[in-house]
Amino acid sequence: MELDALFGDGKNSDVDTIDPDAEVQEFEIEEAPEEVDERVGGIGWKMLTLFVCGGLVITALAVAFMVWVIEGLVL
């Protein structure tokens, strides 16, 4: 059976792929610093403002172009 390597009882040794005597490596987990720098993280309110205003300008230009094209087709 295919799942014997994961759930087998060890009777079929040709299917077992896990070495029980393998060396285990342990890694230390570094703690996050207590102090948070206000300059780090996020895109900032200035960049967000520019992004939103740029999107509004591009949308306005697209709408103006569509109105110009539709007027040209109708008239």
Image (spheres, helix red, strand yellow):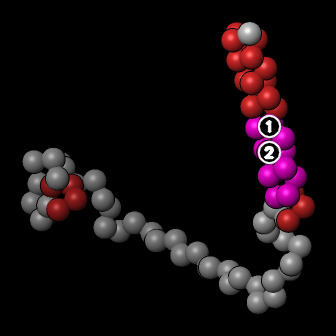
Question: What secondary structure is the stretch in magenta mostly built from?
Answer: helix
Residue at image point 71% right, 82% down:
32
Mark 2 in CB contact with mark 1 (< 8 angstroms)? yes
Secondary element at tag 1:
helix
Label 1 is placed on what type of residue?
A: Ala
Q: Quadrant of the C terminus?
A: top right
Which residue does the image show at 32% across and 61% down from the upper left?
A: 19
| Residue at disc 2, secondary structure | helix
Amino acid tagged 2: Leu
- Identify whether 50 is placed above or below 30: above
Which disc number belongs to residue 51? none
Residue 64 to residue 60: above or below: above
x and y percent of residue 27 in the render? 58, 75
Q: Which residues are magenta?
A: 48-60
Classify residue 38 by image quadrant.
Answer: bottom right
**Which residue is the site of mark 1?**
60
Residue at 40% in and 66% down: 22
Q: Is residue 52 magenta?
A: yes
Q: Nearer the viewer, residue 2 or 25?
A: 2
Could you tell whether 31 is left or right of 20 in the image? right
The residue labelled by disc 2 is 56
As rendered, which of 2 and 69 lies closer to the eye?
69
